[in-house]
Image (spheres, rainbow, N blue to C red):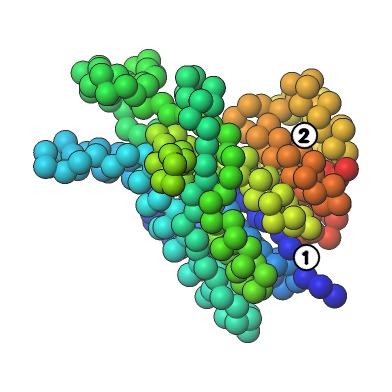
């Protein structure tokens, strides 16, 4: 039996919110991923990085405040740093878990860039909040630099960056080569490092890319058999958070689009996951998208829980 190729998208729960939390969280995550390897899945893994990139951005900004000779790190550099250190923790934890099960398989992290459109509407209406809380004075300094800020009453101001749609994954052929060599690949972490093409050069963009959006694109580009999105709930729900909340065990691509149109999914949580599944299935109609929690994924791949979306 040939292995099923799958992109697995990891949410915040898989990584924790601090360095110490991440060390513990990735050990649990590695067990779930190793279960998939044992079930004969060939894994390409992508992951969130919201808390991690925010932490790095805070640290680099504070370094500049203390040591005036240091230059603040732009968002693209913070994204690259987060990819490196999150990938490092995942690949080491997963390698150790696999070896503990008698499985010798290379696990590699690819620093991944993703092109975006400089005229994407997201650059005119940034929505992603990052970094530390600032005073009014610091916020005014950011505004003078051309950056956007958002006030949280009683707490202060925070930087806001754009979340443009991904266009192309720059390192897709390198990812594909490792996938075809039956290696476990960690790529497009945090949505990928957003870059803008300028002739033959790639220039980092002050933005972040939605992690679920890149998961759907990555699965589509690789034409994987499945896309597995691991999140904080066991199922996708209709009427979530109400007395009429109903778990959905399976829906069609058309039903998914109808539920999106009906406003069934919250913009910052489930909606991007459903949109990622839709984008993937439109490119790979023979594929299957599965949305569930990490603790349930072993049962979900057997059809016992989770939400499956197919054409």
Q: Residue at x 37, y 17 (%)?
A: 151
Q: Position of residue 55 (x, y in %)?
A: 35, 43
Viewer-nearest residue: 250 or 195 = 195
Query: Furthest residue to the front?
Result: 199
The answer to whether 173 appears left or right of 275 in the picture is left
Q: Is residue 172 above or below residue 254?
A: below
The answer to whether 228 appears left or right of 187 in the picture is right
Query: Furthest residue to the bottom?
Result: 102
Q: Is residue 304 above or below residue 108?
A: above
The answer to whether 109 appears left or right of 18 in the picture is right
Q: Residue at x 66, y 55 (%)?
A: 8
Q: Position of residue 145 (x, y in %)?
A: 27, 23
Q: Residue at x 37, y 52 (%)?
A: 81
Q: Position of residue 257 (x, y in %)?
A: 81, 29
For label 1, the crowd category at 10 Å Cα-Cα, with few meaning under 14, some 14 to 19 and many 20 or more, is some
User: Nearer the viewer's eye, disc 1 or disc 2?
Assistant: 1
Quarter holding the N terminus is: bottom right
Residue designated by label 2: 237
Q: Residue at x 69, y 40 (%)?
A: 276
**Quadrant of the rendered structure where residue 243 is?**
top right
Query: SS of the residue at dot 2?
Result: strand
Asked whether the residues under the numbered discs 1 and 2 touch, taking CB atoms below 8 Å apart as contact, a structural biologist would say no
Viewer-nearest residue: 207 or 301 = 207
Task: Look at the image and tell me whether residue 64 can be seen.
Answer: yes
Residue designated by label 1: 4
Task: Look at the image and tell me whether residue 297 can be seen.
Answer: no
| Marking on residue 272 | none
Label 1 vs 2, first from the N-terminus: 1
The answer to whether 300 appears left or right of 64 in the picture is right
Quarter holding the C terminus is: top right
For label 2, the crowd category at 10 Å Cα-Cα, with few meaning under 14, some 14 to 19 and many 20 or more, is some
Q: Position of residue 41 (x, y in %)?
A: 73, 67
């Amino acid at each position: 039996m040939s292995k099923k190729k799958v992109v697995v998208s990891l949410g915040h729960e898989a990584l924790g919110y601090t360095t110490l939390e991440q060390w513990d969280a990735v050990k649990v995550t590695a067990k779930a991923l190793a279960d998939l390897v044992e079930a004969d899945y060939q894994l390409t893994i992508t992951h969130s990085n919201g808390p991690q990139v925010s932490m790095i951005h805070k640290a680099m900004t504070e370094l500049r405040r203390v040591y005036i000779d240091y230059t603040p790190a732009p968002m693209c550099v913070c994204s690259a740093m987060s990819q490196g250190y999150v990938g490092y923790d995942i690949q080491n934890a997963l390698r150790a878990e696999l070896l503990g099960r008698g499985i010798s398989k290379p696990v590699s992290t690819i620093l991944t860039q993703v092109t975006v459109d400089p005229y994407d509407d997201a650059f005119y209406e940034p929505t992603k909040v990052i970094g530390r809380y600032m005073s009014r004075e610091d916020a005014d300094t950011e505004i003078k630099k051309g950056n956007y800020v958002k006030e949280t009453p009683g707490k202060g101001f925070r930087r806001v960056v754009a979340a443009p749609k991904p266009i192309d994954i720059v390192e897709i052929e390198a990812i594909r080569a490792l996938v075809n060599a039956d290696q476990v690949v960690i790529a497009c972490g945090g949505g990928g490092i957003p870059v803008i093409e300028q002739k033959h050069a790639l220039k980092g963009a002050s933005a972040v890319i939605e992690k679920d959006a890149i998961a759907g694109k990555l699965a589509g580009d690789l034409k994987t058999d499945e896309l597995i999105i691991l999140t904080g709930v066991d199922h996708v729900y209709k009427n979530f958070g109400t007395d009429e909340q109903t778990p959905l065990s399976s829906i069609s691509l058309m039903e998914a689009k109808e539920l999106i149109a009906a406003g069934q999914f919250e913009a910052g949580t489930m909606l991007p996951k459903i949109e990622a599944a839709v984008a993937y299935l439109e490119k790979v109609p023979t594929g299957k998208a599965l949305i569930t929690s990490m603790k349930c994924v072993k049962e979900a791949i057997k059809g016992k829980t989770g939400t499956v979306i197919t054409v």
